[in-house]
């Protein structure tokens, strides 16, 4: 599942119409033009995202100036990767030469033989060895490299400092356990006037996504280490659901409106009517710029429970039809756009600050060593958000097990959506039965491999 605010600049992706000829997106028409190597790329911000679009176009222009033998053709649309069309584009040969993927897509794209192997070429990617090893591993299948990570996120607890103060809670000591979350939610809900202590998603696969994150926080997992068996029908799984049930029906701290999705919860938080919810750091600018929130009131704590958190992110893979010249050109483009510390589309913090884009949010670090040091120094020098509000998140993440989403994530989330929605809407919900049934369905999904 993607993180919820699309990260600062991830507003869009090029999705070439499936009615277009293969040459419109694929490599056949793009290998060379006027002696240049031409590459098609996607995830260009739409025209409606004026500032991000401007940045993207500026960076492509500067890349082409520095590399006059390469022509970059960028495609835009929304979202960056649409699950409804992604597989069809791959199967139809209509994917761009360099295309955006979620972390959870990597193995699938390789399994269906739609990715070019990059192992012989990554030595030409200047930044590759500076990227976090656990992120590189996501795009490494059977010892071969098939993609390059670009951004990452991890889940935490966003909370409203103003509501904490009004409820007699210490905003500098956010809940560290689920028991403390429940207690804080009850006090916040007691403020009345439609105030909700804690909210959670339970529709459109988002409930299953958050259940997974909450299960990780309890030390559990969704599937076994070998990926062959469901592991949700466990004490940890029951603890997640029992806690939600107790907050919803025993404490009445989650409000009566359920079957919520991300936009609903963001609207509640931005309007000052919600105390806490799980999210990644990229939610914060959405809450401020689109939902009416204030940076000074919004803080971020690590995932309650202290055992684990869900991580996700994205990167780029290459069309299996891409020529060696296109692969080399695409890797140069990735270095220029996304993987130069303190520079480029995602790293030019001075430019972002000048254009009133948030700088200083606690995104998980992409780089290591001197590259990380440089990136953090430039970010710190240009920070324009209250970074002290996120220190607990940064400190707490150091001791958490960072766990990627399960295989077949969207199918599994669909199953778990039904479990979470039942617990939040039915006072007579049978948690044991729900988990047993979900386990069987997930086993069926895993057995298809």
Image: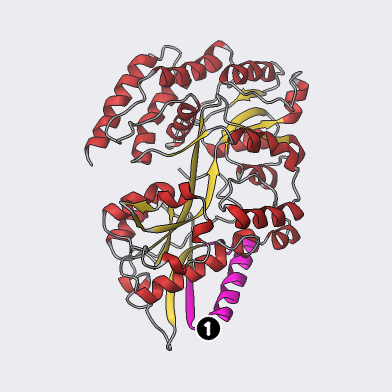
Residue 433 percent across, percent down from the top left: 33, 16
| Residue name at image x 49 percent, y 28 percent | 214
Q: Is residue 333 above or below residue 268?
A: below
Question: Quarter-wise, where is residue 396 in the image?
Answer: top right
Q: Is residue 327 above or below residue 447?
A: below
Task: Using the image as rendered, state which of residue 306 and residue 215 is in the foreground.
Answer: 306
Question: Quarter-wise, where is residue 99 in the image?
Answer: bottom left
**What segment carries the magenta color?**
44-73
Residue 305 percent across, percent down from the top left: 55, 24
Q: Is residue 357 visible?
A: no
Q: Mark 1 falls on what kind of element?
A: loop
| Residue name at image x 37 percent, y 58 percent | 146
Q: Which corner quadrant holds the N terminus?
A: top left
Magenta segment: does it hold 69? yes
Q: Which residue is mark 1?
A: 68
Q: Is residue 342 visible?
A: yes
Q: Is residue 154 above or below residue 236?
A: below
Q: Is residue 195 left or right of residue 418?
A: right
| Residue name at image x 55 percent, y 55 percent | 10
Task: Using the image as rendered, state which of residue 53 and residue 332 is in the foreground.
Answer: 332
Q: How many marks?
A: 1
Residue 40 percent across, percent down from the top left: 43, 71
Q: Is residue 428 above or below residue 158?
A: above
Question: Quarter-wise, where is residue 46 in the image?
Answer: bottom right
Task: Using the image as rendered, state which of residue 230 and residue 354 is in the foreground.
Answer: 230
Q: Is residue 131 left or right of residue 295?
A: left
């Amino acid at each position: 599942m993607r993180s919820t605010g699309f990260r600062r600049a991830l507003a869009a992706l090029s999705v070439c119409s499936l009615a277009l000829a293969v040459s419109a997106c694929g490599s056949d028409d793009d290998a060379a033009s006027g002696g240049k190597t031409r590459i098609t790329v996607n995830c260009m911000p739409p025209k409606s995202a004026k500032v991000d679009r401007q940045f993207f176009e500026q960076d492509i222009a500067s890349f082409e100036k520095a590399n006059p033998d390469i022509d970059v053709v960028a495609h835009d649309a929304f979202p960056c990767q649409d699950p409804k069309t992604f597989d069809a584009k791959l199967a139809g040969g209509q994917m761009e030469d360099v295309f955006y993927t979620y972390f959870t897509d990597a193995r699938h794209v390789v399994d269906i033989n739609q990715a070019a192997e990059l192992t012989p070429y990554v030595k030409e990617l200047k930044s590759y060895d500076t990227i976090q090893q656990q992120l590189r591993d996501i795009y490494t299948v059977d010892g071969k490299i098939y993609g390059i990570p670009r951004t990452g996120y991890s889940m935490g607890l966003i909370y409203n400092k103003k509501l904490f103060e009004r409820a007699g809670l210490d905003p500098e000591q956010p809940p560290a356990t689920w028991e403390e979350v429940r207690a804080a939610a009850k006090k916040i809900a007691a403020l009345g006037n439609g105030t909700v202590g804690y909210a959670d998603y339970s529709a459109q696969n988002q409930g299953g996504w958050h259940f997974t994150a909450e299960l990780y926080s309890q030390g559990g997992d969704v599937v076994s280490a070998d990926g062959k068996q469901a592991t949700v029908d466990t004490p940890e799984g029951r603890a997640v659901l029992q806690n939600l049930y107790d907050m919803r029906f025993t404490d009445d701290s989650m409000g009566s409106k359920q079957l919520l999705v991300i936009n609903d919860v963001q609207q509640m938080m931005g309007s000052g009517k919600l105390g806490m919810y799980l999210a990644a750091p990229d939610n914060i600018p959405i809450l401020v710029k689109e939902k009416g929130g204030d940076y000074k009131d919004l803080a971020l704590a690590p995932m309650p429970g202290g055992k684990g958190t869900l991580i996700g992110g994205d990167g780029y893979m290459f069309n299996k039809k891409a020529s060696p010249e296109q692969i080399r050109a695409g890797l140069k483009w990735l270095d220029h756009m996304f993987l130069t510390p303190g520079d480029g589309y995602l790293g030019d913090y001075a430019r972002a600050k000048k254009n009133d884009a948030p700088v200083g949010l606690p995104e998980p670090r992409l780089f290591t060593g001197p590259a990380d040091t440089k990136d953090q120094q430039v970010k710190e020098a240009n920070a324009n958000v209250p970074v002290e509000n996120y220190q607990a998140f940064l400190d707490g993440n150091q001791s958490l097990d960072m766990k990627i989403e399960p295989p077949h994530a969207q199918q599994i989330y669909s199953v778990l959506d039904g479990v979470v929605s039942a617990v939040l809407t039915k006072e007579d919900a049978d948690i044991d039965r729900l988990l047993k049934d979900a386990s069987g369905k997930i086993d069926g999904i895993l057995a298809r491999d």
